[in-house]
Image (cartoon, grey):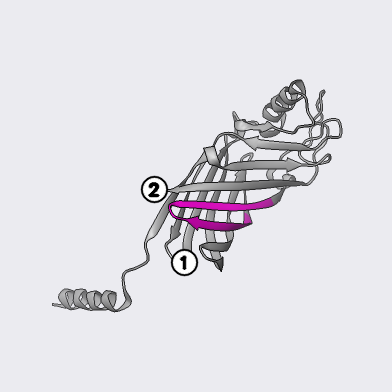
Amino acid sequence: MRTIITTLLLTVLTSMLGAAPATVTYNLDASQSKFMAHANRSGLLWFKGKSHHLAASDFSGQVELTEGTVTPATLRLVVKAASLHETGADFTEPQKQIINKELREIVLHPEQYPDITFQSTNVSAKSSGADRYDVKIEGNLTLHGVTRRITIPAVVTLNGNNLRAVGEFSIDRDDYKVKATSAFHGLVRVSDKVKFEFDIVGRRA
């Protein structure tokens, strides 16, 4: 009898309050997305006084959000460390090959630490227009085998079955044990700050 009464009460409450908002899943479309690391002449890399612009060519991710309110929401992003490569226009192709080799062998060690990952733990959102939200994403960034908590600000736009999230954040390389290792061709110093930039497009699952 108690079970029947409880079921009836839940049915009445659900009817009064309405159904819970739906959770929507978006899968990242890497072909339309961008994830980059930027370093000036005293940044992550230094090669003959020129700035570096490293792009990731292999990454994936998933966003789950609540329809109508965005939150609760989650984000998971996985970047293959070996896919980061130099794109700076100031470098010749032979110089880019040297930089990419030293990225793998001296800085990122992708054989030992293949993934750069971010997993959200809390998301807050504030509407800034029709289907547009200013979002703060708290979570854990794992880089070079070290995990640290960070907060990423982003602007999220929803358009039909598509989601777009644009933002940037910076990290202290010392926190992730990315060493300043001298090298014959150009990795001669590493500064404290590295800026990451993303422009992520997701398709509704």
Q: Residue at x 59, y 28 (%)?
A: 111
Q: Quadrant of the N terminus?
A: bottom left
Q: How many marks?
A: 2
Q: Residue at x 50, y 52 (%)?
A: 163
Q: Which residue is mark 2?
A: 205
Most common SS among magenta residues: strand
Residue 26 seen anywhere in this rendered image of the structure: yes
Tell me if mark 1 has few (under 14), some (14-19) or many (20+) residues whose alpha carbon lies within 10 angstroms of its own.
Answer: some
Three-letter code, disc 1: Thr
State the residue lying farthest toward the right: 49
User: How many angstroms separate mark 1 from mark 2 (CA)?
Assistant: 18 Å
Q: In which image quadrant can residue 80 be found? A: top right
192, above or below 80, in the image: below
- The magenta region covers 150-169
User: In terms of depth relative to the viewer, which is nearer, 94 or 89?
Assistant: 89
Would you place residue 203 above or below residue 12 in this image?
Answer: above
Judge whether residue 165 is colored magenta. yes
